[in-house]
């Protein structure tokens, strides 16, 4: 048998008749967008935690301890600790500059660019949402 579109169509039709093709579930565009959003938020949360741990370790090397701080007060506490150490302030400043941008994802704030996805994720039960 020669290879042609007509023969390919016959072969596919025969395979459909005998059940060699199974129906598959295709996820909707909204569900794929929601999954991508949640995955991105998870990545940002992990990166923020990595940055905070790096800052804590750097300060510990200089004998400074951050301790337990309330959410949103970490940056102020670090700035307070490095206020008397200008070289140390220059070391931690770039890491502190990243914290405010990622902090809102830790707190659960959703980006403004996707209100329809945000509405979908907020309607889901808490057990199905990504952990904060």
Image (tube, rainbow, N blue to C red):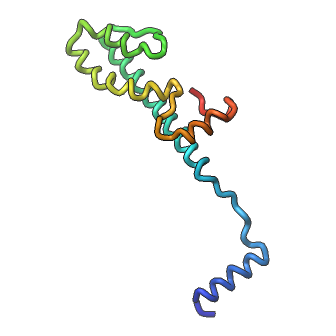
Q: Hey, which residue is sitting farthest left in the picture?
A: 87
Q: Which x, y percent locates residue 7? A: 64, 88
When the figure is inspected, residue 3 is found, relative to residue 81, above or below; the finding is below
For the N terminus, the image quarter is bottom right
Q: Which x, y percent locates residue 4? A: 58, 89
Closer-to-camera residue (40/52): 40
Residue drawn at 48 percent across, 11 percent down: 70
Closer-to-camera residue (61/9): 9
Q: Is residue 37 left or right of residue 61?
A: right
Q: Is residue 76 left or right of residue 14?
A: left
Q: Which x, y percent locates residue 80? A: 32, 8
Closer-to-camera residue (65/31): 31
Which quarter of the picture shows residue 74?
A: top left
Q: Is residue 16 left or right of residue 59?
A: right
When the figure is inspected, residue 112 is found, relative to residue 16, above or below; the finding is above
Q: Hey, which residue is sitting farthest right in the picture?
A: 18
Q: Which x, y percent locates residue 121? A: 61, 36
For the C terminus, the image quarter is top right
């Amino acid at each position: 048998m020669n290879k042609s579109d007509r023969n390919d169509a016959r072969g596919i039709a025969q395979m459909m008749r005998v059940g060699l093709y199974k129906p598959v579930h295709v996820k909707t565009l909204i569900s794929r967008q929601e999954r991508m959003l949640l995955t991105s938020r998870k990545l940002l949360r992990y990166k923020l935690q990595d940055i905070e741990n790096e800052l804590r370790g750097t300060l510990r090397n200089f004998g400074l301890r951050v301790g337990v701080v309330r959410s949103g007060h970490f940056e102020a506490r670090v700035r307070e600790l490095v206020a008397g150490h200008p070289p140390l302030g220059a070391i931690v400043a770039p890491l502190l500059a990243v914290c405010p941008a990622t902090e809102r994802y830790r707190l659960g704030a959703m980006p403004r660019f996707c209100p329809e996805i945000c509405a979908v994720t907020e309607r889901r039960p808490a057990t199905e949402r990504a952990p904060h």
